[in-house]
Image: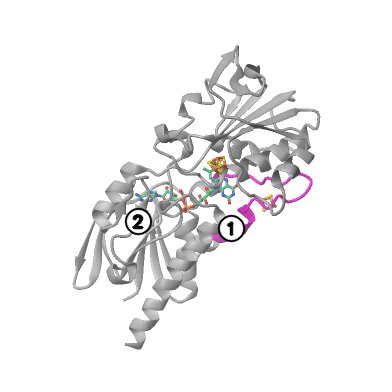
Amino acid sequence: MNNVLIIGGGLAGCTVAQELSAAGLDSCIVEKSAFLGGKVRGYGCKADAKCNNCGLCAVGDLWQSVESNQKIKKLCNAHVIDIFKENGEYKALIQTDNGIIEENFSELVVATGFESPDKTTGSEYDSSAYPRVYTGNALEKLMMNRKENSLFPEAPKSVAFIMCYGSRNVKERASYCSQVCCAYSTRAAKVIKHYYPEAEVVMFYMDLQAVNPGNYARELEEAGIKLERCRPVDISFDGDKPVVAFEDEEGKTKRSFDYLFLNTGIHPDVMNNTAIADITGLRVRSDGFLTYVEQPENTGVYLAGCAVAPMNTYDTIASARNTAAMLINNATEGSVK
Ligand SMILES: Cc1cc2nc3c(=O)[nH]c(=O)nc-3n(C[C@H](O)[C@H](O)[C@H](O)COP(=O)(O)OP(=O)(O)OC[C@H]3O[C@@H](n4cnc5c(N)ncnc54)[C@H](O)[C@@H]3O)c2cc1C
Ligand code: SF4
Ligand code: SF4
């Protein structure tokens, strides 16, 4: 029997399912939310006058193709309660809208992704209370819902971005780099400049990941974006306008901006990962992401996507294809034996 249980129906889980089906293998996606696609489905295009290669087009028609694929069973609003190994197969108890079902699987893939960034960091600046502050998810919504001639409710004179917000910060239990926020925020900054060429756009940064080949800092400066190398020490408000306190070469300064973007990154959902690790035999690392205890070929339990570490869409697709290739290889070897 080759029927693979995939826990998590985001980009990683859907890519694994699609690859397995192309090789003739059945799978079942168990997705806790009401729809497939995970976080990426709520993101927006970051083209200005031209495509900025933000990675979203790499998804193509994946959602539609998975939704209509008969070899992929989809259980949304569902979660796995427990998993047992019996006679070399996995038996999973799955809570669905129609009660608990029991099903047998040959292998498992854990593709549970990461926590919604606004729930981990940035949640203190909820958009209903702070309409001029945008966390990572809010930035993506802004990009998704933009009109041809307007982006914000009113044309801004000044906009600031705080990079690494909640990442590279031991207090947030995230001393690592989230990998994706330099890219999504600088592309969004270019979009803002395209809509509002007169607006001052300042990016407070500590480090800048290579987003495009060549001198990316110069590319941003040529687009009229100012790079300010420092970590702001405080955010306060003057009425509803955000005020950023930072220290530059001239000493301590405070500046108000029309809009403020907090570059929230990728954080593990530690409670979720702990529960998944308990039933699958995986391990939660000290940074909260999941890892193997034993080689997946020995246990039949595989990982894919941001459940393992922060990654962008290209790397998520590559990670999922790699996992699918291992499963397909096992199935082929099994049928030859
Ligand atoms: C603010 C922000 C902006 C970004 N913008 C870009 C961008 O412009 N370009 C780019 O290339 N990358 C971007 N990324 C990265 C991108 O979000 C990831 O590469 C991608 O979401 C990873 O997909 P995934 O399937 O691993 O995880 P997710 O998208 O998190 O999907 C995981 C899925 O698993 C489900 N799930 C979780 N736990 C369970 C459970 N226990 N049972 C059942 N289902 C479960 C979730 O509901 C979800 O549907 C951005 C990231 C952030 C934080
Ligand atoms: S979604 Fe991203 S990759 Fe696609 S056109 Fe827009 S900027 Fe380019
Ligand atoms: S990707 Fe950029 S903004 Fe995000 S944590 Fe890494 S260095 Fe900071």
Query: Is disc 2 surrounded by few (<14), some (14 to 19) or many (20+) residues within 10 Å?
Result: some
- The part of the image, by quadrant, that contains residue 245 is top right
Q: Examine the residues drawn in magenta and state their main secondary structure.
A: loop
- Seen in the picture, residue 103 relative to 99 is either above or below; the reply is below
Which SS class for mark 2?
strand
Residue 318, given in percent of the width and then of the height, sits at: 52, 63
Q: Which residue is mark 2?
A: 291
Which SS class for mark 1?
helix
In screen coordinates, is 232 left or right of 96? Answer: right
Q: Is mark 1 within 8 Å of ligand 2?
A: no
Q: Say if residue 174 shows up in the picture.
A: yes
Residue 59: numbered disc: 1
Labels 2 and 1: the sequence-earlier one:
1
For the residue pair 212 and 75, the one nearer the viewer reads as 212
Q: Given the image, on which type of amino acid does mark 2 rest?
A: Thr
Q: Is mark 2 within 8 Å of ligand 1?
A: no
